[in-house]
Image (tube, helix red, strand yellow):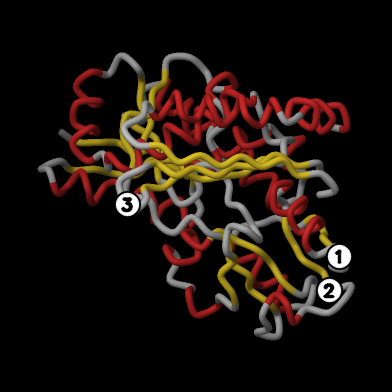
C-alpha cells in the first residue's frame, strides 16, 4: 500500500511524518508527504495569540481536511496539539501512535545558564498557558512574556536578546538534533508536561478499515495505553487551549499505571493536583477517575474562570 501522509510544512512536523513513514516501510509499504501550511503556522509568523486563532486545533485542522478531501490517507500530529475529543470533528480516529519520546520540558538560555541562575526580571518566552502558569507559581520573580514561532525562529530571537530563556518540549528538540542547546531538563514537579507530549499520533478516517488495520501494526501499545489515560483526563475536564492543565501517565517498574495531573489558575496562585497508581486497570476509566478527583477539588471552577477571562 502507498500512503499519502498529510503533515504541517515545518521542519519538525516533516521529521515526525517521516518517522511514521519509516515505520510503514518496515512493514512493506511506501509513502509520500503531503505538506500543509496550517492556521497555527501562519499565526506563528505574525506572533499571533494561538488561543484566539483556533487554539490547539489551529495546527491540525487543515491537515485533517486534506484527509477528509481524499488528498491524503493519514495525518500525523504531535498529540499535545490535538484537542479534546469533544472539540474534534466526527469521522476521524487515531488508531496508532509511535513510542513516546521524553515527555519533559527543557530550558534553553541565552547565556547557557541553569534555570535557577536566571536573575529577577529575566524574560522567559513562551506561548503556552500551561507553562506560563507553572512558571508564575514557582518562579514569580521571572517575567513571562508571550513568545511564538517555530523552534528555529525562537532560538534566533533568543540569541538576538529578545528574551533570556525559552522553554520547549525535549522531544521536539531531540528530533531536530538540537540537544546541545539544552541547558536544563525540567523535572515534572517543576514543570508538568502537556497531555500527550512526546507522542506522535496517526489519524485517519474512521471508516478506513484497511488503513486502520495497517496502522495498528505499527502502534506502540504501552504509549497508546498511557495516551488513552491522558486524553480521558482532558475529556473528563472538558478543558481546552485556554485551560492551564497538565499531566502524564507512565508504567512503573512493577507494571502499574502511574498518572499525575494538575489544573491551575492562569496566574499560578492556585494549583490543584491529582495522583493515582493502579495495576490491571482500564486506562480510560483511570483517566476519568483522575478528572473526577480534580473536579472534586475545584478544578471545574478554575476551568470556568479561565474560559470567562478569555
- In front here: 212 or 103? 103
Characterize the local packing of mark 2: few (<14), some (14-19) or many (20 or more) Cα atoms within 10 angstroms: some
Question: Which mark is first along the chain, 2 or 3?
Answer: 3
Please tell me whether mark 1 sits on a helix, a strand or a loop: strand
Q: Which mark is residue 143?
A: 1
Q: What's the CA distance linking mark 3 and mark 2?
A: 37 Å
Q: Is residue 165 left or right of residue 122?
A: left
- Disc number placed over residue 18 in the picture, else none: 3
Q: Of label 3 and label 1, which has the lower sequence position?
A: 3
Viewport quadrant of the C terminus? top right
Residues at marks 3 and 1, CA–CA distance in whole angstroms: 37 Å
Measured in 3D between alpha carbons, the distance from the residue under mark 2 to the one under mark 1, in whole angstroms, is 6 Å
Task: State the residue in front, 285 or 113.
Answer: 285
Q: Which mark is residue 122?
A: 2
Task: Give how far across and how far down residue 97 sits, in percent.
Answer: 34, 40
Viewer-proximal residue among 137 and 84: 137
Amino acid at each position: 500500500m502507498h500512503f499519502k501522509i498529510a503533515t504541517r510544512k515545518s521542519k519538525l512536523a516533516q521529521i515526525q511524518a517521516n518517522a511514521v513513514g519509516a515505520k510503514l516501510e518496515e512493514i512493506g509499504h511506501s509513502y509520500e508527504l503531503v505538506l500543509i501550511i496550517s492556521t497555527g503556522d501562519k499565526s506563528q509568523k505574525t506572533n499571533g495569540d494561538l488561543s484566539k486563532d483556533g487554539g490547539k486545533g489551529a495546527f491540525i485542522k487543515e491537515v485533517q481536511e486534506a484527509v477528509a478531501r481524499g488528498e491524503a490517507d493519514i495525518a500525523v500530529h504531535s498529540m499535545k496539539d490535538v484537542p479534546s475529543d469533544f472539540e474534534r470533528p466526527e469521522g476521524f480516529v487515531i488508531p496508532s501512535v509511535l513510542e513516546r519520546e521524553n515527555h519533559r520540558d527543557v530550558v534553553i538560555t541565552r547565556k547557557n545558564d541553569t534555570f535557577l541562575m536566571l536573575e529577577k526580571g529575566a524574560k522567559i518566552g513562551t506561548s503556552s498557558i500551561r507553562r506560563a502558569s507553572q512558571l508564575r507559581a514557582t518562579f514569580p520573580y521571572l517575567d513571562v512574556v508571550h513568545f511564538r514561532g517555530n523552534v528555529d525562529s525562537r532560538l534566533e530571537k533568543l540569541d538576538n536578546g529578545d528574551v533570556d530563556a525559552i522553554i520547549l518540549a525535549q522531544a521536539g528538540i531531540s528530533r531536530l538534533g538540537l540537544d546541545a542547546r539544552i541547558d536544563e531538563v525540567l523535572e515534572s514537579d517543576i514543570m508538568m508536561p502537556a497531555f500527550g507530549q512526546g507522542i506522535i499520533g496517526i489519524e485517519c478516517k474512521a471508516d478506513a478499515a484497511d488503513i486502520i488495520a495497517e496502522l495498528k501494526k505499527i502502534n506502540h501499545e504501552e504509549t497508546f495505553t498511557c495516551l488513552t489515560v491522558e486524553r480521558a483526563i482532558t475529556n473528563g475536564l472538558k478543558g481546552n487551549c485556554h485551560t492551564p492543565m497538565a499531566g502524564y501517565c507512565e508504567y512503573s517498574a512493577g507494571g502499574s499505571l502511574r498518572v499525575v495531573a494538575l489544573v491551575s489558575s492562569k496566574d499560578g496562585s492556585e494549583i490543584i493536583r491529582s495522583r493515582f497508581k493502579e495495576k490491571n486497570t482500564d486506562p480510560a476509566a483511570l483517566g476519568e477517575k483522575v478528572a473526577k478527583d480534580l473536579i472534586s477539588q475545584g478544578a471545574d471552577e478554575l476551568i470556568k474562570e479561565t474560559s470567562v477571562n478569555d
